[in-house]
Image (cartoon, helix red, strand yellow):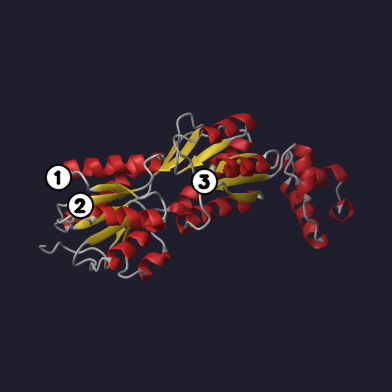
Amino acid sequence: MAKVAGVDLSTVSRLLRDDRAASYRPETRARVLAAAEQLGYRVNAQARALRLGRQDSIAILVPDLDNFGFTAVLRGVQEACEEAGVTLLISEIGSSAPERTDRLAALAGRVDGVLVAHAQDTDTALQAWLDDIRLPSVFVQRSIPGASVSVLFDEENNAAAMVDHLVAMGHRDIAHLSGDLSTDTAKRRKVGFDSAMAAHGLSIPRGRRADGGWNIEGGRAAAEKLVAGRKRPTALAVDSLVQAIGMLGALHAKGLSIPDDISVITIDEHPLAAHTTPPLTTVYLDQRELGRRAATALLDWVDGTPAQNLIVESPSDIIDRGSTAPPVAQ
């Protein structure tokens, strides 16, 4: 290749690994790149990683691969990794302690940094593992006490957007189907819901909130609790689309019509929301951008630029579909 480009071997080596590439003349760089293209040269990623003492891979820890709420986040992370030439390892860390410990241990020595998209306040094993591996770690849409760096949405604002939309339609008796309240995300959405209700002069009577985890089964069980009384709420604000799917099943099973009997709004937009019965009104968040920003922060940290906590500003846009309407007198 050096012969084709008309330069020495050291110049080819440095230019192809961007080592002091800026010090070479543009025409020299152009000749080397043209020769590499002509000869079909590709950088040996394994050799590069060995030279740099790096794995050229990062991991993302997710709670549940069945949770389609993470697909847009993962897409954003994958895009950032592809642009950086880094491999992304996805690990479903499981709910049981032994399962989680085994899967975390399997990542040791294989990655340069970790994105954490699942964490509970009480998960001391996860924090201990992160402390032990001493690698850059960025929490995505989650945080725990002692977390190094977190990239988050303004969850208070997202939850408030649900309340504002329902109140604008005339609803006053609004129940909250929350996420797992052992997670930072659910806690911040709870604060946003409560603050918005108070701002509108509305109370939250006992029995108007239920923890629905972050899954379909939890959403179903929580919805059954919230509509069990003689006087059901006129609207439900749901913390995630996954929970809302389970909630729809529970409401339909009870013979309730949506939105005639009860309106429903949820955080998280996904193509599936347009195909439920009825189509769900959602709060759109740019989860793809959240994933990109989190991955970029981690990759920059791996390259030596310390990351900082970040709130990704995303307008809480309402996609108004058939699941919300003004309340009908019960």
Q: CA distance from mark 2 to mark 3?
A: 31 Å
Position of residue 14 relative to residue 77, above or below, is above
Q: CA distance from mark 2 to mark 1?
A: 9 Å
**CB-based contact (under 8 Å), mark 2 and mark 3:** no
What percent of the width, then of the height, locates residue 86? 66, 48
Quarter of the picture holding the C terminus: bottom left
N-terminal label among 2 and 1: 2
**Circle nearer the viewer, 2 or 3:** 3
Viewer-closest of 43 and 231: 231
Labelled disc at residue 314? none
Amino acid beneath label 2:
Ile
Question: What residue is pinned by disc 3?
Answer: 95
**Element class at badge 2:** strand
Viewer-closest of 73 and 145: 145
What percent of the width, then of the height, locates residue 262? 21, 62
Which residue lies at the image location 24% right of the left edge and 41% below the top edge?
194
What percent of the width, then of the height, locates residue 126? 55, 36
**CB-based contact (under 8 Å), mark 2 and mark 1:** yes
Q: Residues within 10 Å of mark 1 (few under 14, many from 20)?
A: some
Question: What residue is pinned by disc 2?
Answer: 174
